[in-house]
Amino acid sequence: MKRSALYLALLMSCFHATAFAADVTHADNHVQSQQNYTEVQKINAVLTIENATAKATIPGASVSAGYMKIINNGDTAITLVSASTAIAKHTEFHRMFMRDNTMAMRKVDALEIPANGSIILASKGYHLMFMGVKQDLKPNQVITVTMQQGNGKQFDVPLLVVPIKKY
Ligand SMILES: [Cu+2]
């Protein structure tokens, strides 16, 4: 009983598919003049991040999701093995998929960014899942996520918190 309620909250935080996509677009326009977090961020010699955002929390739910496009300009594939942030107890890589005509999601152990390629974290596919969020995430707040690579290196990504479309 309690487990299924938690799962529903997790799903809602990940999904909100089309409504959220529209909202992100609107949020981008709104904040672009004051913040650069939704634009292109050069992380290091090979990695570039675009549109790094996190969803504001739903009142009463301690979960949120993070999205971005990660571009690998290098000649070697990069594997992300974990992510963490001070604002949540647990951060996981998740993937949404269809099961019997309903959206479901599962944890994935790692994300691979191909050489000279990219991976997109978005509401219908891969995403960062923040669980045990310690304080409400409010629009325009910026959170920092640390990504751990398989080769032992790590890098930080700032994510801009954007509103959840109410419906
Ligand atoms: Cu998820």
Image (cartoon, helix red, strand yellow):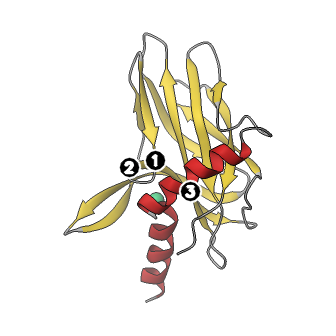
Kind of element beneath mark 1: loop
Helix, strand or loop status at disc 2: loop
- In the rendered image, the residue lying farthest to the left is 100
Rounded to the nearest angstrom, the CA distance separating label 3 from label 2 is: 17 Å
| Residue 15 shows up from this direction | no
75 above or below 118? Answer: above
Which residue position holds label 3?
23
Distance from disc 1 to disc 3, alpha carbons, whole Å, reads: 13 Å
Q: Which residue is mark 2?
A: 125
The amino acid type, in three-letter code, at marker 1 is: Ala
Percent from the top left, x then y, of residue 49? 58, 29
Dot 3 amino acid type: Asp
Estimate the x, y position of residue 133 in percent, counting from the top left.
Answer: 67, 64
Give coordinates of residue 80: x percent, y percent. Answer: 49, 34
Specify the quadrant that holds the N terminus.
bottom left
Q: Quadrant of residue 164?
A: bottom right
Tell whether label 3 touches label 1 (CB within 8 Å).
no
Looking at marks 3 and 2 on the same chain, the residue that comes earlier in the sequence is marked by 3
The residue lying at 73 percent from left, 45 percent from top is 31
Who is closer to the viewer here, 156 or 119? 119
Q: Residue furthest top?
A: 75
